[in-house]
Amino acid sequence: SHSIAHLKPEEVTAYQLIFDRLAKVRKIDRRHWHHRPIFRHAWMHYYIYRDAEQAKADLMPLFALKSNLKSHISIWKPGFERPGKHFEYAHQYTVFMIELAQVTNDANTLKILCRKLRKNQ
């Protein structure tokens, strides 16, 4: 459930509209290629609705922490993306995941991320 006591009524309405639209985009994206709506949902859970656990749960599918992949993150890179943008997204999502893991006292995720990031240098 969302924590909305700190928001004005009109902000609640606006944020809910944005949140619902992002949910629609995610539902339409059956192949899970689009990572930005996932990140934005997680961002809203944390910064707007103050729910770090749900934010982490939303963001976790973008990460390959339990797999044997060398990379710690698993996001689709479309051909039309500007050079360097993929790295920017990976960096942004990683920094956010580290923050969420710290706030939720998730030492296991931090340990796995640390190991994978060290290997990936």
Image (cartoon, rainbow, N blue to C red):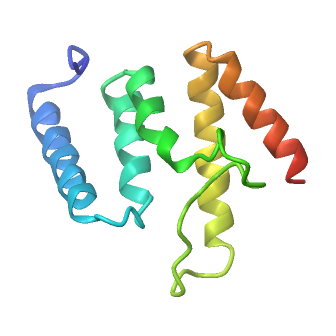
| In the displayed structure image, the side of residue 38 where residue 118 appears, left or right | right
Total numbered circles: 0
Residue 33 pos. (x, y %): 42, 67
Which quarter of the figure has residue 97? top right
Q: Is residue 83 above or below residue 67?
A: below
Q: Residue at x 28, y 64 (%)?
A: 30
Q: Residue at x 57, y 17 (%)?
A: 103
Which quarter of the figure has residue 45? top left
Q: Is residue 102 above or below residue 61?
A: above
Q: Residue at x 59, y 46 (%)?
A: 63
| In the displayed structure image, the side of residue 11 where residue 37 appears, left or right | right
Question: Closer to the camera, 91 or 48?
Answer: 91
Q: Is residue 59 above or below residue 105?
A: below
Residue 113 pos. (x, y %): 74, 36
Which quarter of the figure has residue 44? top left
Q: Residue at x 48, y 30 (%)?
A: 56
Quarter occupied by the C terminus: bottom right
Residue 112 pos. (x, y %): 74, 32
Residue 50 pos. (x, y %): 37, 21
Quarter occupied by the N terminus: top left
**Furthest residue in direction front, as rendered:** 68
